[in-house]
């Protein structure tokens, strides 16, 4: 949809090659999530659609309930902002999904920009992790996650870059992973395959 349109075609193809069927979701117009096994919210410009996103309260509640109930979810940058408590820009504040206990506050200058180097922590929820491996990716965001009211778990330790707090990125809650970092599916980091396997792993656990 217009609020979240930043997806690498190669990453979407990698998700399909890993066995996923892609189902489009419109956070501005749809009233609720469809029947899905996992959710990927990419980057975009939620700040320019913040009032429309806030007005679609039924979709926000649908996503909040799904994540609270353990839906495997991956969010990048704009997706992280949407999952925060509220979005603040140009003196206006709009309610967002609220599953991340902080506010996405827009600033005049970039709060994170350029290439980043990450290392996974033991809190990374996806299978196949390697805490010794360095992941190369990038970030570009004018917002910063502020007013956090809880101490969270993080999937990544920043070796270079800003992330969420200057030292970490990848907020982990239930089966949610939300980061400012934009990943590319490469031979060095098969994130799409790992996310799909995480969805399958979650399905197997739910059937027990």
Image: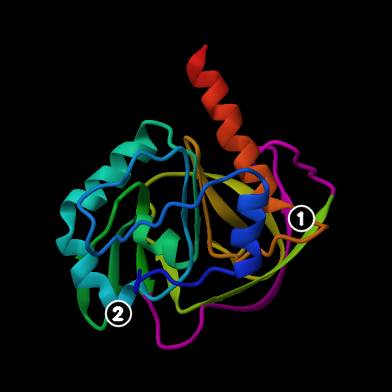
Position of residue 96 in the picture relative to residue 24 (left or right): left
Residue shown at 70% from the left, 60% from the top: 185
Q: Are marks 2 and 1 in contact (CB under 8 Å)?
A: no
Q: Position of residue 63 (x, y in %)?
A: 31, 46
Q: Position of residue 176 (x, y in %)?
A: 48, 43
Crowding at dot 1, Cα within 10 Å, few <14 / some 14-19 / many 20+, comes out as some
Between 30 and 152, the residue placed more toward the observer is: 30
Crowding at dot 2, Cα within 10 Å, few <14 / some 14-19 / many 20+, comes out as few
Residue 179 seen in this snapshot: yes
Residue 69, by quadrant, is top left
Circle 1: element type: loop
Between 151 and 124, the residue placed more toward the observer is: 124
Q: Position of residue 86 (x, y in %)?
A: 28, 61
Residue 127, by quadrant, is top right
Instruction: Please report the bounds of the magenta region as a residue range.
Output: 106-132
Pointer 1 residue: 189
Pointer 2 residue: 48
Q: Is residue 113 above or below residue 162?
A: below
| Gap between marks 2 and 1 measured at Cα | 31 Å
Circle 2: element type: helix
Q: Main SS type for the magenta part?
A: loop
Label number found at residue 174: none
Q: Position of residue 157 (x, y in %)?
A: 68, 54
Residue shown at 37% from the left, 66% from the top: 104
Residue shown at 25% from the left, 64% from the top: 28
Residue 150, by quadrant, is top left
Position of residue 99 in the picture relative to residue 5 (left or right): left
């Amino acid at each position: 949809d217009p609020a979240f349109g930043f997806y690498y075609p190669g990453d979407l193809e990698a998700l399909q090659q890993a066995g996923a069927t892609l189902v489009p979701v419109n956070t501005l117009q749809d009233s609720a999530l469809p029947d899905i096994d996992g959710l990927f919210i990419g980057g975009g410009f939620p700040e320019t659609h913040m009032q429309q996103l806030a007005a679609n309260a039924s979709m926000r509640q649908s996503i909040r309930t799904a994540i609270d109930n353990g839906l495997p979810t991956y969010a990048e940058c704009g997706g992280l902002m949407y999952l925060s408590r509220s979005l603040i820009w140009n003196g206006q504040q709009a309610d967002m999904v609220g599953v991340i206990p902080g506010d996405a506050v827009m600033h005049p200058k970039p709060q994170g920009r350029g290439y980043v180097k990450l290392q996974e922590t033991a809190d990374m929820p996806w299978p196949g992790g390697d805490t010794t491996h360095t992941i190369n990716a990038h970030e570009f965001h004018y917002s910063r996650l502020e007013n956090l009211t809880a101490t969270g778990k993080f999937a990544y330790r920043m070796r270079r870059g800003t992330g969420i707090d200057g030292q970490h990125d990848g907020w982990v809650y239930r089966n949610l992973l939300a980061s400012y970092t934009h990943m590319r599916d490469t031979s060095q980091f098969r994130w799409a395959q790992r996310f799909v396997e995480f969805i399958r792993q979650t399905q197997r656990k739910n059937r027990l």
